[in-house]
Image (cartoon, helix red, strand yellow):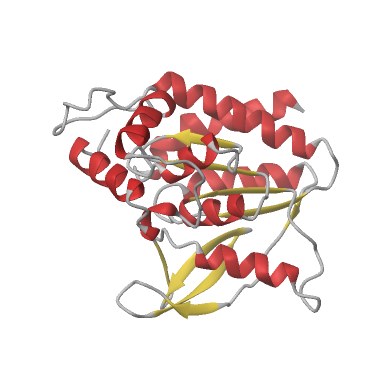
Amino acid sequence: MATSRENNLDHYRSLANRDPYHLFGLTLRGRWSYRDVLELMARSAGVVADPGHREGQDTIDPDLTIAAVEAMGDTIAGVLRRGAPRVLMATGHPTGLLTVHLALARLLRRHGAVMMSPAEGWSYWGSGYGRKRRIRYMDDVAMLDDRGAFVHTHDPAPMQAMLGRLAEPAGPGDGRPDLVIADHGWAGAAGEAGLLTVGFADSNDPALFVGEAEGKIAVTVPLDDNVLPRHYDPLTKYLVERVVRAL
């Protein structure tokens, strides 16, 4: 995978130090020392467990990815079986994982899901060069827009704004979503709010895995989160087929 061991370990230390940028909007109950995070990531994502391995290549175990994809598919199918579930989708990776989200959104619409789009146009001064960013949806998937371009983000604030809008008495009136499919801070904020949340995360983003260990995230799929979109095709096909078979 492209993510280096040095980058992984640096982010594990940052989470252990409770750096907000790496928490993705989650508050953690456990102690979660650096060693704790490394041990969890070895179990959940398949990174090298040896703390003495400090530089060079790291790994993601494909068997763990497949198992998590299957769990995600089963969770999505379980929600669809309820009939007309409300679903909220978002990604902080418009150049990579967006393709997976778009395929899932198409599947959900075909099977009767009500796709939610709260707070479209909501804006704030984000961390990207101090410029204003706003929520924009493309085919029912929320992303952050910066002067006409979708941008990468870890920030939980947009999801917090979306959920706040849904909670307003004069808001859309759609109620809370039955399922959130997201990544980065979009997923973390949803899980923190107590929503059924499934998401994707790279080996250098431990927050969602910790959130899963604490019961706030239902499923976290370990993968490289920013490869060329076409490289996600096999995973997307497998996930969609898993959902359909489980219905």
Q: Position of residue 36 (x, y in %)?
A: 36, 33
Q: Which quarter shows the C terminus?
A: top right
The residue lying furthest to the front in this view is: 31
Residue drawn at point x = 66 percent, y = 70 percent: 164
Tell which of 172 and 19 is nearer to you.
19
Q: Name the quadrant containing residue 204.
A: top left
* One can see residue 224 in this view: yes
Residue drawn at point x = 60 percent, y = 33 percent: 72
* One can see residue 238 in this view: no
Above/below status of 86 relative to 103: below
Q: Name the quadrant containing residue 83.
A: top right
Q: Position of residue 115 (x, y in %)?
A: 72, 56
Q: Name the quadrant containing residue 62.
A: top left
Q: Which quarter shows the N terminus?
A: top left
Above/below status of 242 relative to 231: above
Residue drawn at point x = 31 percent, y = 27 percent: 47
Above/below status of 108 relative to 114: above
Tell which of 105 and 193 is nearer to you.
193
Tell which of 22 and 145 is nearer to you.
22
Q: Position of residue 99 (x, y in %)?
A: 49, 47
Image check: 80 left or right of 103? right
Q: Position of residue 229 (x, y in %)?
A: 41, 44
Tell which of 80 and 245 is nearer to you.
80
